[in-house]
Image (cartoon, rainbow, N blue to C red):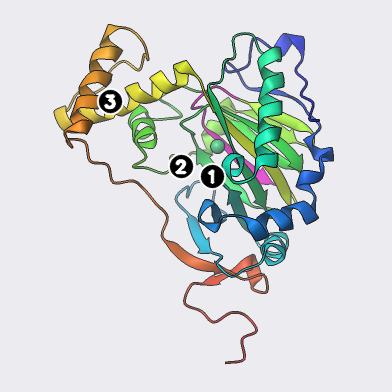
Amino acid sequence: MPTVDLYDRSRRDFGVRPVMSTHNLHRHPLFSDEALVELLDHYPREHLYALTMGTDDTRTDDNRLAVHDGVSGASLLRAVKSGRLWLNVTQVHTADRRYRALIEQLFAQLVVLVPGLRPESTQGTLLISSPHALVYYHADASPSVLWHIRGRKRLWVYPAADDRYVNREHLEDIYAGVRHEYLPYDPSYDQAAVVYDLQPGQWVSWPCNSPHRLVNLDCVNVSLSTEYCTRDSRARARVYVANRFLRTRLGLRNLSTRGNGVAALVKTSAHRIARRCGWDPLQLKRHIPLLRVDPEAPGGTVAIDAKPTGSRS
Ligand SMILES: [Fe+2]
């Protein structure tokens, strides 16, 4: 049974300020190498993404997607250990009921610990990543909690709802799905960051849309990223997408981001009608695969049209 701790003094900070506390998932058998290999072997591969990255923190678009069809779970894990990539095991809450149950148990405890927390739905992505891998500066649309399980990593969390760190129009595009979560980054932003050196058995949350970035230390890392929706977060998402529509179609800028009230109701209702009429077609942003996972290759990947490493033909 997973356990979640949260200091009394941090309970009112949850969702308002960055918060770190402890859990015991690092002792759970679902996150051993054997369990991960078994999970990957049976995983619906359309929900599994392998991504490589560069080394320059400021080149936040430098992610490349690698295909992995025909690559076994053991080989995927070997590529992570010897290479430099991330496995994003998305939709783990729908793909495997053991992880679904675990996420439900975690949030059942969080709801008791955090005053007013009322998640309407939760979802999870298991993150398995290489030594020295990094996740570029980005902001997620949904509120989230990161449960760190294996390895060590450094996390920077930046102020939310501050135009100096996240441009409102970028956030509108992220909510609409027409832009990846990655944002322009300047190292000077770090002066405003809260920094955590995460160890197995620690969890962190931050305010919705707070930009953040991560760097693994010299070891394989396993974390469970959970996102949750509340009535407020759904209302917020609807307003951001409606604001984007009004900006791109009518040139209206700097509209209020308040998720409730008359203005929000008018904007979101207008947008709902516009969508039904096909007036807001969205070109969803997707990575194009350029690489293939190959545990024998330096870095753990090769160009998608290259022959597999060790091929004799
Ligand atoms: Fe994130």
Question: In the image, is the residue at mark 2 within 8 Å of ligand 1 by its beta carbon?
Answer: no
Residue, disc 3: 242
Q: Position of residue 255 (x, y in %)?
A: 27, 18
Question: Is residue 196 a member of the stretch shown in magenta?
Answer: no
| Residue furthest to the bottom | 313
Q: Which mark is residue 13?
A: none
Would you say the residues marked 3 and 2 are in contact, meaning their CB atoms lie under 8 Å apart?
no
Per the rendered image, the range of residues in magenta is 206-216
Circle 3 or circle 2, nearest the eye: 3
Helix, strand or loop at disc 2? loop
Residue, disc 2: 182
Helix, strand or loop at disc 1? strand
In the picture provided, is 228 more to the left or to the right than 172? right
Marks 3 and 2 sit apart, C-alpha to C-alpha, by: 21 Å
In the picture provided, is 2 more to the left or to the right than 273? right
Q: What residue type is disc 1 on?
A: Tyr
How many neighbours does mark 2 have within 10 angstroms: few (below 14), some (14-19), or many (20 or more)? many
Q: What residue type is disc 2 on?
A: Tyr
User: Is residue 48 positioned above or below 159 on the image?
Assistant: below
Question: Is residue 208 a member of the stretch shown in magenta?
Answer: yes
How many neighbours does mark 3 have within 10 angstroms: few (below 14), some (14-19), or many (20 or more)? many
Helix, strand or loop at disc 3? helix
Q: Position of residue 300 (x, y in %)?
A: 63, 67
Marks 1 and 3 sit apart, C-alpha to C-alpha, by: 27 Å
Residue, disc 1: 136
